[in-house]
Image: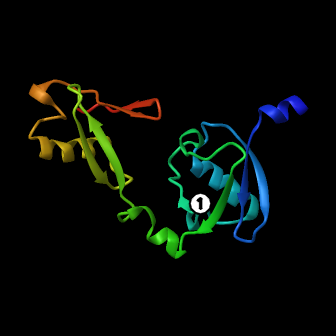
Amino acid sequence: LACLLVDAMLVTIVYPTNHRLQFKINPNLTLYQILDEACLRKGLETADHALKFHSRILDLALTFRYSRVPVNGTLEIVRREDEDIADHQNVVKNLVKIAVQFTDGTRVSKHVEPDSTLLQILKLVENDRNQNLVKPDGEEMHPVVVYLNTEASETFD
């Protein structure tokens, strides 16, 4: 049992009521999953809260591995209405930033709605590059999205 505790990755969650709980995590969990589990344990609404490390609001889409939070670190759950969240990180109306990288190595960054499809994003980028990305020269294309080393693809008719 002592051997398991040494290898376990733990994070301490501090709730708005100053209660503290330790969570066993793995590096591939997203911060959203950690927040969701922590909120579930105390009956809080996940959508109304965010995670804070020191004075920085964390991006919930990141995995713990890429969050810059140390193992055995302390995360604070804060309400989204707090002024430090509303003004923090220059959030633009819930838009997400994506980057499209082409086979020649060039990249185009855009802010899009979180529910945008791959086809919508490619059509948006097409307008900027004056290039047909969806069906060049009548060929069928299979664009691939790589997010945190996981591939997802979509076939366009």
Mark 1 lies on a secondary structure that is strand
Image x and y of residue 140, in percent: 20, 25
Taking 155 as reference, is 26 left or right?
right
Q: Which residue is drawn at 63% across and 55% down?
A: 35
| Of the pair 23 and 70, the residue shown nearer to us | 70
151 versus 100 height, above or below? above
Colour scheme = rainbow
Going by the numbered disc 1, the residue's amino acid type is Lys
The answer to which quarter of the image holds residue 45 is: bottom right
On the rendered structure, is 147 left or right of 108?
right
Residue 152, image x, y percentages: 40, 32
Asked whether residue 62 is in view, the answer is yes
Total label count? 1
Nearer to us in this view, 95 or 138: 95
Q: Name the residue under label 1.
A: 52
57 or 138: nearer the viewer? 57
Answer yes or no: is residue 1 visible: no
Give x and y (percent) for residue 11: 72, 48
Residue shown at 70% from the left, 56% from the top: 38
Residue 32 horizontal side relative to residue 18, left or right: left
Q: Quadrant of the C terminus?
A: top left
x and y, in percent, of residue 15 in the image: 71, 65
Q: Which residue is drawn at 61% across and 67% down?
A: 78
Quarter in which the N terminus is drawn: top right
Bin the neighbour count of mark 1 within 10 Å (Cα to Cα): few under 14, some 14-19, many 20 and up.
some
> Based on the displayed image, in which of its 4 quarters is residue 70 positioned?
top right
Q: Where 67 falls versus 44 (above or below)?
A: above
In the image as oriented, which residue stretches furthest toward the right? 1
Q: Which residue occupies 46% across, 30% down?
A: 149
